[in-house]
Image: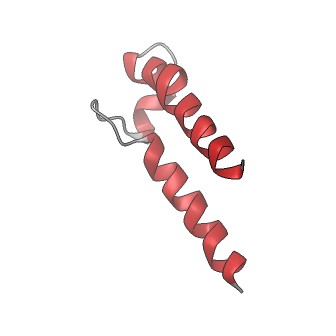
């Protein structure tokens, strides 16, 4: 029962965390692969999320 609730919450919060930071990034900004927002997303936000998830699993 708990996993049924916790896994969707984890997914939603993970997606929200990708767009939270000093510079605002919207999902529409990611469609332009040459923009600064996309670079911030790929260099900073996505690796941050992966590191947080791996640390939580350990």
View extreme (front): residue? 58
Name the residue nearer the viewer: 43 or 34. 43
View extreme (bottom): residue? 1
Q: Give the number of marks.
A: 0
In this orientation, does residue 32 appear?
A: no
Q: Position of residue 11 (x, y in %)?
A: 60, 58
In this orientation, does residue 5 appear?
A: yes
Q: Residue at x 64, y 43 (%)?
A: 55
Whether residue 13 sits left or right of residue 51 in the image: it is: left
What scheme was used to colour the molecule? secondary structure
Q: Position of residue 12 (x, y in %)?
A: 53, 60
Q: Residue at x 62, y 78 (%)?
A: 5
Name the residue nearer the viewer: 35 or 15. 15
Q: Position of residue 56 (x, y in %)?
A: 63, 50
View extreme (top): residue? 34
Q: Quadrant of residue 1?
A: bottom right
Q: Residue at x 48, y 24 (%)?
A: 44
| Rendered view: 26 above or below 41 | below
Whether residue 29 sits left or right of residue 52 in the image: it is: left
């Amino acid at each position: 029962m708990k996993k049924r609730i916790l896994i969707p919450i984890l997914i939603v919060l993970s997606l929200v965390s990708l767009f939270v930071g000093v510079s605002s990034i919207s999902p529409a900004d990611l469609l332009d692969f040459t923009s600064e927002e996309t670079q911030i997303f790929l260099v900073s936000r996505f690796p941050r999320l992966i590191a947080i998830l791996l640390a939580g699993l350990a």
